[in-house]
Amino acid sequence: IHIDKSRMLDEKKCDEFITSVRKVKNTAVCASITPICILYVIFFVSQTNYFLYAFSGKLPTGYNYSQYARQGFFELCIITAINLLVIAIVNVIAEREGGNKQFSLKMYNIVLCVFTLFMIAVAISKMFMYISKFGLTRLRISTKRYIDFLYIILIIIKQFKLDFRLSKWSTVIFTVMFGILCFSRPDFVVAKYNIAMYESGELEELDIYQLTGMSDDSWEVLLESDCFNVENRKDFEGIAELKKRELKDDSYERLNISSLKVLSFLD
């Protein structure tokens, strides 16, 4: 209500504050990043077979598919967090010559981004291996949004175009990707993919209880498919009867296309 105009932020004051923070020599900054890069090189070289197995579709000895995919996800989270933190700190505290970022600092940022992109590629390959063996789930779909990948690309662009609005485009990409995830009917995609893989023989078993436990988008695909054998059809018909009653009990709360299709199929 009572605005103190003397404390209002504007672009000039923000630039002055950031300039006052940039006091560390680029030589010191580069010297501090170098051991991290060397450590990454040693780590990747020593684990070459472990990482390359992900691209060849083979499991390393002593792992199962879920362990391999899960470990890849947590490795990605840790390395991405470390690299983004390092990049953020060094770009805030490093001195600028004539307002420009030194070439050596740009190169170190790009190297850290490349290491991160490699870990993203490894994690995605592991997840694809897991999905090809056991099919899709809601959680496996959300881990494949590639937001980390796109954000790292934005950071690389920022190294060559200093006036690039990183925060703005990061927000745009996150909003678009989140919107795609919300409006892509994930349960429909899960059911469609798993049933298609089962019918083609790629999946050994179809988890009918997983599919019937999801939303009406999954049921829509389920009821249109003809992939159930005699042994599980009886169980499925019992679940379908419960589903029909559930839809009729609160039909006014389920006024969407999938629910109406499911109800018409069951009737």
Image (cartoon, rainbow, N blue to C red):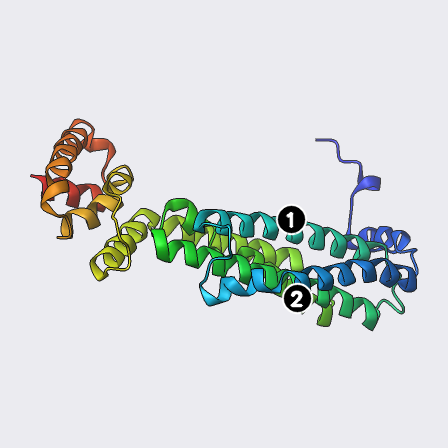
Report whether residue 9 is seen: yes
Q: At which x and y percent is residue 116? A: 64, 60
Q: Which residue is mark 2?
A: 114
Q: Is residue 172 left or right of residue 40?
A: left
Between the C-alphas of marks 2 and 1, the distance is: 15 Å
Q: Residue furthest front?
A: 61
Q: Residue furthest top?
A: 249
Which class describes the residues within 10 Å of circle 1: few (<14), some (14-19), or many (20+)? few
Q: Which mark is residue 259?
A: none
Side of 38 where 211 appears, left or right? left
Rendered-image quadrant of the C terminus: top left
Q: SS for tag 2?
A: helix
Q: Residue at x 58, y 53 (%)?
A: 171
Position in image of residue 153 (x %, y %)? 61, 65
Q: Quadrant of the N terminus?
A: top right
Task: List x then y, in percent, for residue 29.
Answer: 87, 59
Task: List x then y, in percent, for residue 74.
Answer: 58, 47
Q: Amino acid at mark 1?
A: Ile
